[in-house]
Image (cartoon, rainbow, N blue to C red):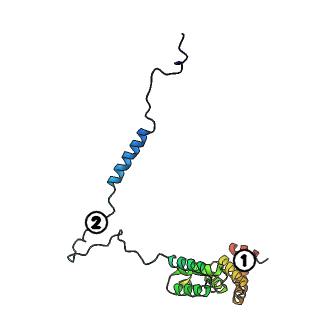
Amino acid sequence: MNEDPDTEFVDSDIERRSGPWRLILIVAFVTLIGVLLVPGESPQAPAPVSGNDTGAVAPSLLDDARPAAAPGVTARQLIAESRAATDPGLDRIVDTAREMQANGAQTDAYLLLFYAAREGHAGAALTLAEQADPAHRDPTNSFHDSADLAQAYKWYVVAIERGSTAAQQRLAALKRHIEKLARNGDEQAQRLALKWQ
């Protein structure tokens, strides 16, 4: 067989391939159908509650009515303002945190105290320590569900580093409490007692 060298590699049976276009068209078509089947953006008025003659409607979960601010939002705004200011106003932050805690805004209060303590406010660190210390925490108004010896230790140390003498006394009392628990077999207390050795 003596074939022409120019047509040697040419396939005489030309097979047309559709390439990716068929798949692209299918995906576009399915997407278009999906978009058309999804309800529009304008919400419909909810149906009246049966047996209600006043014409009032049942509340909808889709209503735009939302609480004023989610937990932590106010604190994050105050922290952002504090970071942007030349004077961070840590005393004002701590006072606001205490007001928020008294009003039940625990998340905001905790975030503000945490920020102030990390920025160097001894009183904020002391408050965080007291919230975790079993001897000083108020279970009805605490950030923690239960006493947390490790958190109390950590924040007392921070408060001491920031110059709090009250934190020194509280840490000494916490140390005695932890040593007693460690002697009685409490594993967490035993681990914490090692930090004092």
Precedes in sequence: disc 1 or disc 2? 2
The x and y percentages for residue 88 are 61, 83
Up the image or down, 9 lies above or below 105; here it is above
Whether residue 75 sits left or right of residue 48 in the image: it is: right
The x and y percentages for residue 18 are 43, 34
- Amino acid type assigned to the residue bearing label 2 in the image: Gln
Quadrant of image for the C terminus? bottom right
Quadrant of image for the N terminus? top right
Residue on which disc 1 sits = 182
The x and y percentages for residue 106 are 53, 80
Residue appearing at x 40%, y 74% in the figure? 66
Q: Which mark is residue 154?
A: none
| Residue 146 shows up from this direction | no
The residues bearing labels 1 and 2 have C-alpha atoms spaced at a distance of 63 Å
Residue appearing at x 70%, y 86% in the figure? 167
Residue appearing at x 39%, y 46% in the figure? 28
Residue on which disc 2 sits = 44
Viewer-closest of 47 and 13:
13
Residue 109 is drawn in which quadrant?
bottom right
Q: Secondary structure at mark 2?
A: loop
Q: Secondary structure at mark 1?
A: helix
- Amino acid type assigned to the residue bearing label 1 in the image: Ala
The x and y percentages for residue 156 are 69, 82
Q: Residue furthest right?
A: 197
